[in-house]
Image (cartoon, rainbow, N blue to C red):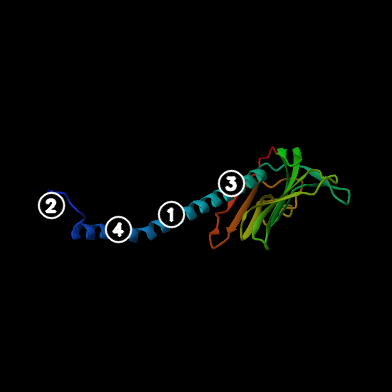
Amino acid sequence: MMSPEASGGEQGFTLVEAIIVLVIAAFAMSLAPGIINLGQRAVTLTASLKENSDDYRALDAALSRIAAARREFARSPDGLSRLAFRGEPSRIQFVTEFSNGPNGGGLYSIELEHDQASAVLIMTLEPYPAHGRTAGTRTALLRAQNLALRYFGFSRMDGDRRWMDSWNGSGELPSLVEVTLTLPDGKGALEPIVVAIPLSN
């Protein structure tokens, strides 16, 4: 019968092997919090990018609606026809066409405004002319601290083309609308975006 020493087989780990395994395990465990933190940051960044891309898509949709504003007239309470386009420093209302709006295709009145209380850009959409139909559909487009609008076109005062803080329609649409949004959470203001309204509208 052979003794365990004579068989040549190993019976376990040597002290050096055990220390090497423990050092490798300790090193791997020291990296784990960093890897977990990196994963959490990647998830947060991805969510932020998705939120920003959704915001920019909503903004782009709103701007494309401004570019499609139509020269429609509405009868005012005094019996006169007035252009159904009103532009104020932080609010714009106009008529545009939708192929598939909340009540089907056709003309809709759109109002874009900034709601200070909830810090969001709101779009209200209702069929045009309303004729006592259902109330408009309000949608929060994106978070924003502020909305500033300016309008370029012929001034009724002096007949010159210039930028104005409001547009009360002299029967014509403005040629350009400048939109400046201030984003929340210290992200600053976007560069002013200028939207051209084609003369054919």
Answer few, some or many: residues within 10 Å of disc 2's Cα (few below 14, many 20 plus, some between 14 and 19).
few
Instruction: Name which of mark 2 and mark 3 comes first in the sequence.
Output: 2
Disc 2 vs disc 3: Cβ atoms closer than 8 Å? no
- Looking at marks 4 and 1 on the same chain, the residue that comes earlier in the sequence is marked by 4
Q: Quadrant of residue 119?
A: bottom right
Q: Nearer the viewer, residue 170 or 125?
A: 125
Q: Which residue is mark 2?
A: 3
- Residue ID for mark 1: 39
Specify the label residue 25 is tagged with: 4
* Number of dots carrying numbers: 4
Q: In screen coordinates, is 17 left or right of 194? A: left
Disc 4 secondary structure class: helix
Q: Residue at x 60, y 56 (%)?
A: 181
Mark seen at residue 57: 3
Q: Is residue 66 visible?
A: yes
Residue 126 image point, x, y percent: 76, 46
Comparing marks 4 and 1, which lies closer to the viewer?
Answer: 4
